[in-house]
């Protein structure tokens, strides 16, 4: 017999419109009042261990004193200044540091406020790059099945239209049409992919990929070899290679950036989420010198005319610089390796459960993939009862905890998954 969902308590806030929520039927949200380390304290006094780092941002945990102090010092100087006609030391320093850390060949950093906008900027750069070079008509992109690149319209347009996160029927005829294919996982796949690029080169501005892990599209993994095949095919066919590292950047998969594992340098790379350690909104679209040079000319029409109002916000840049300090001073990648080792052992019992079709781990990402009907509301409620914040979506339950999570807290997360997924599996058999 199917177990009843936990009783819904409280109600949705009267004037808020919540994200990714059918508010007529879903359980009202929890009210948070404080955070510390890997924990979230609720208004009713309960504490939850955060298994998803506030949508993968809080890599250093919550309220890290070094980041908090850096933001406080910047606030005492000035919280914001327009980036049109002004620059400031936090942004200059952050851009220099990012270029020093990123794969060699990347040279210029364009700041914005969110991952979706970073992608929009990358697409806009790619199209204008070809126009500035005198190649018109190259305004379509190649995306990959199960890929996801954001909620804004252009980002939605290069996310998988069939199996992706968004239901495209609401926007039929409004979103531009692009090309979609599978990530090449064999030599035969790679040859077909490159042949496709060759045949359509005159239409294609670039190829957009999430390196090694397709996140919102289902936490699907692919190999460094597959990523190299994509990059090499783009280079040979004269198509821009755009890496969406919004979710994978800053150590989540085991290296500071996913492109490092494959030894590839994209023409354009997008960052956000963990850039500020989960403190303030900030994103970066980073381009190669060759891309920048196409805009650097004594011709006003070749300028890149884009400028978010809060571009390079000094408070956010201060937080990002402090976050980079922590990657230099504290053993973040070693912590990621320890989390990966724990996941490999602790999540393995799920593999034997009926209804579980896969268990996979990559760095500080642990995934239990389910089959059949998945009641997200029930699962989320049971996890809360177990004292953990885990938010299943699609056909999976996953973990992406803060890197600083304590061993006992990590054990609470994985124990909760084994227990609750076991209950879900038993319901399926009943």
Image (tube, rainbow, N blue to C red):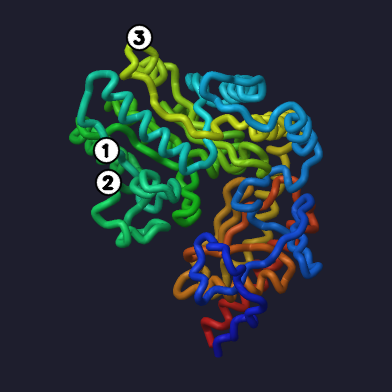
Residue 29, image quadrant: bottom right
Viewed as shown, does residue 264 lie left or right of 41?
Answer: left
Label 2 neighbour load within 10 Å: few <14, some 14-19, many 20+: some
- Give the residue pinned by disc 1: 140
**Circles 1 and 2: CB atoms closer than 8 Å:** yes
3D distance between C-alphas at marks 1 and 3: 28 Å
Viewer-nearest of discs 2 and 3? 3
**Circles 1 and 3: CB atoms closer than 8 Å:** no
The total number of labels drawn is 3
Residue under the point 23% across and 38% down: 196
Q: Is residue 154 above or below residue 395?
A: above
Label 1 neighbour load within 10 Å: few <14, some 14-19, many 20+: many
The C terminus - image quarter: bottom right
Q: Earlier in the sequence, mark 1 or mark 2?
A: 1
Q: Earlier in the sequence, mark 2 or mark 3?
A: 2
Q: Earlier in the sequence, mark 1 or mark 3?
A: 1
Residue 238, image quadrant: top left
- Give the residue pinned by disc 3: 298
Viewer-nearest of discs 1 and 3? 3
Residue under the point 45% across and 46% down: 222
């Amino acid at each position: 017999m199917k177990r009843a969902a936990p009783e819904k308590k409280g109600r949705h806030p009267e004037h808020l419109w919540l994200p990714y929520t059918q508010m007529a039927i879903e359980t009202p949200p929890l009210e948070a009042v404080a955070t510390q380390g890997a924990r979230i304290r609720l208004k009713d006094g309960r504490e939850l261990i955060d298994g998803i780092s506030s949508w993968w941002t809080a890599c250093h945990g919550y309220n890290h004193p070094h980041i908090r102090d850096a933001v406080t010092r910047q606030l005492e100087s000035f919280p914001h200044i327009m980036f049109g006609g002004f620059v400031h030391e936090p942004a200059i320093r952050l851009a220099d540091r990012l270029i020093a850390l990123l794969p060699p060949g990347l040279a210029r950093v364009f700041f914005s406020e969110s991952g979706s906008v970073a992608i929009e900027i990358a697409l806009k750069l790619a199209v204008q790059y070809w126009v500035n070079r005198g190649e018109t008509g190259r305004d379509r992109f190649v995306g990959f099945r199960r890929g996801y690149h954001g909620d804004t319209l252009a980002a939605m347009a290069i996310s998988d239209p069939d199996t992706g996160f968004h239901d495209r029927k609401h926007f039929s005829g409004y979103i531009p049409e692009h090309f979609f294919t599978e990530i090449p996982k064999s030599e035969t796949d790679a040859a077909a992919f490159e042949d496709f690029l060759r045949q359509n080169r005159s239409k294609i501005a670039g190829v957009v990929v999430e390196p090694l892990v397709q996140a919102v599209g289902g936490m699907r993994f692919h190999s460094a070899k597959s990523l190299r095949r994509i990059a090499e095919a783009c280079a040979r066919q004269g198509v821009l290679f755009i890496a969406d590292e919004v979710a994978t950047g800053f150590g989540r998969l085991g290296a500071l950036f996913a492109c490092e594992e494959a030894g590839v340098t994209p023409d354009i790379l997008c960052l956000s989420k963990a850039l500020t350690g989960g403190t303030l909104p900030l994103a970066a679209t980073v381009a190669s010198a060759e891309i920048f040079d196409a805009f650097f000319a004594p011709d006003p029409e070749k300028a890149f005319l884009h400028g978010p109002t809060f571009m390079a916000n000094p408070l956010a840049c201060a937080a990002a610089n402090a976050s980079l300090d922590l990657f230099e001073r504290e053993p973040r990648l070693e912590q990621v390796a320890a989390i990966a080792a724990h996941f490999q052992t602790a999540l393995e019992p799920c593999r034997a459960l009926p209804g579980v079709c896969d268990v996979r781990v990559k760095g500080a990402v642990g995934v239990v993939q389910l089959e059949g009907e998945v009641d997200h509301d029930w699962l989320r409620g049971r996890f809360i009862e177990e004292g953990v914040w885990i938010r299943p979506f699609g056909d999976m339950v996953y973990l992406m905890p803060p890197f600083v999570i304590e061993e006992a807290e990590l054990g609470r997360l994985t124990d909760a998954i084994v227990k609750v997924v076991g209950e879900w599996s038993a319901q399926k058999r009943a």
